[in-house]
Image (spheres, helix red, strand yellow):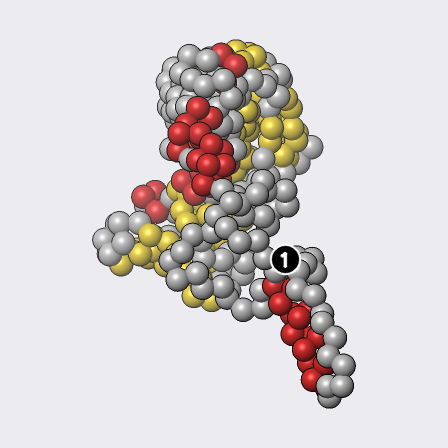
């Protein structure tokens, strides 16, 4: 194969100086394309018309092209397979190998994500007593068992909780499955917030519910399938539910920020990032609501001081 050498610049005595200048510039351009003036800079897309680029050198810079042989050896499925196999010597960090104690989950598993079930949930019974205008709540120390049968020893904790605010109800009625509540003063509730309805007659209106809509500063709605019926009396209570939680492998009991209403949405929010509700304390404007307070998430049977969870 012929070797192309750098083109020289011949002299043209007697020729027009402009011709000599243009000829010199053309020689420089050709030598640049031949690589004699450093890297060849392509100023437009390079169309090879389906032809190959041959004899690619060893890649040095991140932007260098690589040969077919290097790509196959380093990046092909055959080359990557040993690194992707869970039984390999250097698997991906996200791969969990079966029965490998070094890659076993330390804080969660499919079972560990479940809530506690009876009777383990009944091991925690919050003790409530009036104190200094509020309610003193004690979570006793003891062994707590999770749904996967693992256990942790709880540390005792005592808190002085503030009694919730209460606004009296002037009228309450249901049409179909929508209850409309009118209060004697603004409550400040917003749609999606939990509220507790207490003391209404008939008692079927009572419980914790999520506000569907706010009609005015003193009226809102929630869903409850009662048909067409009216009630009387009662009150709306806010900031009355306290969740006590723990996490896996820790006996430290946490008290989450107070919420309004023991609703499914509030419980779901409390059980995030490996948190587990172990006790719920529901207060009223006059004291503790023993019938709605309890441990874990299941009924407490036979206890004279704690009722069933809902």
* Residue 101 to residue 188: above or below: above
Is residue 121 depicted above or below 198 in this figure? above
| Closer to us: 135 or 248 | 248
Residue at (71% x, 75% y) in the render: 24
Please name whichever residue, 83 or 297, is drawn nearer the observer in this view of the structure.
83
Label tally: 1
| Residue 114 higher or lower than 241, as above or below | above
Q: Residues within 10 Å of mark 1 (few under 14, many from 20)?
A: few
Label 1: which residue? 5
The x, y position of residue 77, in whole percent, is: 39, 33
Q: Residue furthest front?
A: 13
57 shown above or below 192? above
Residue in the image at 73% along x and 86% along y:
15
Residue 227 in picture, x, y percent from top left: 23, 53
Asked which secondary structure carries label 1, the reply is loop
**Res 153 quadrant in image:** top right
Q: Residue 133 in the image: state x and y as whole percent.
A: 66, 36
Left or right: 77 as drawn, with respect to 13: left
> Looking at the image, which residue is at 49% across and 36% down?
70
Can you tell which quarter of the image residue 33 is in? Answer: bottom right
Q: Name the quadrant of the C terminus.
A: top left
Residue 257 shows up from this direction? yes
Residue 172 in sight from this viewpoint: no
* Front position in the image: 306 or 296: 296
Instruction: List x then y, in percent, for residue 103.
Output: 50, 18
């Amino acid at each position: 194969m012929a070797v192309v050498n750098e083109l020289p610049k011949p002299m043209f005595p007697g020729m027009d100086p402009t011709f000599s200048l243009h000829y010199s510039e053309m020689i420089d351009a050709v030598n640049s394309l031949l690589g004699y003036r450093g890297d060849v800079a392509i100023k437009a897309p390079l169309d090879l018309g389906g032809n190959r680029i041959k004899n690619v050198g060893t890649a040095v810079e991140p932007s260098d092209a690589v040969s077919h042989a290097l790509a196959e050896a380093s990046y092909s499925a055959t080359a990557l397979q040993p690194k992707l196999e869970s039984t390999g010597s250097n698997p991906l960090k996200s791969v969990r190998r079966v029965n490998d104690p070094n890659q076993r989950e330390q804080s969660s598993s499919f079972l560990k994500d479940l809530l506690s079930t009876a009777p383990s949930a009944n091991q925690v019974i919050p003790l409530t007593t009036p104190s200094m205008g509020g309610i003193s709540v004690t979570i006793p120390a003891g062994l707590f068992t999770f749904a996967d049968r693992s256990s942790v020893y709880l540390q005792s904790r005592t808190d002085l909780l503030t009694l919730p605010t209460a606004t009296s109800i002037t009228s309450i009625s249901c049409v179909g499955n929508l209850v409309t509540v009118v209060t004697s003063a603004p409550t400040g509730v917003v749609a999606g917030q939990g509220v507790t309805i207490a003391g209404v007659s008939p008692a079927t209106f009572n419980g914790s519910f999520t506000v569907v809509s706010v009609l005015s500063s003193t009226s809102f709605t929630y869903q409850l399938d009662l048909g067409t019926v009216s009630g009387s009396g009662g009150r709306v209570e806010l900031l009355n539910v306290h969740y006590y939680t723990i996490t896996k492998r820790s006996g430290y009991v946490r008290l989450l920020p107070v919420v309004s209403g023991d609703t499914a949405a509030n419980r779901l929010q409390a059980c995030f990032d490996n948190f587990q509700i172990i006790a719920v304390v529901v207060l009223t404007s006059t004291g503790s609501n023993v019938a709605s307070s309890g441990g874990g998430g299941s009924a407490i049977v036979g206890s004279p001081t704690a009722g069933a969870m809902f």
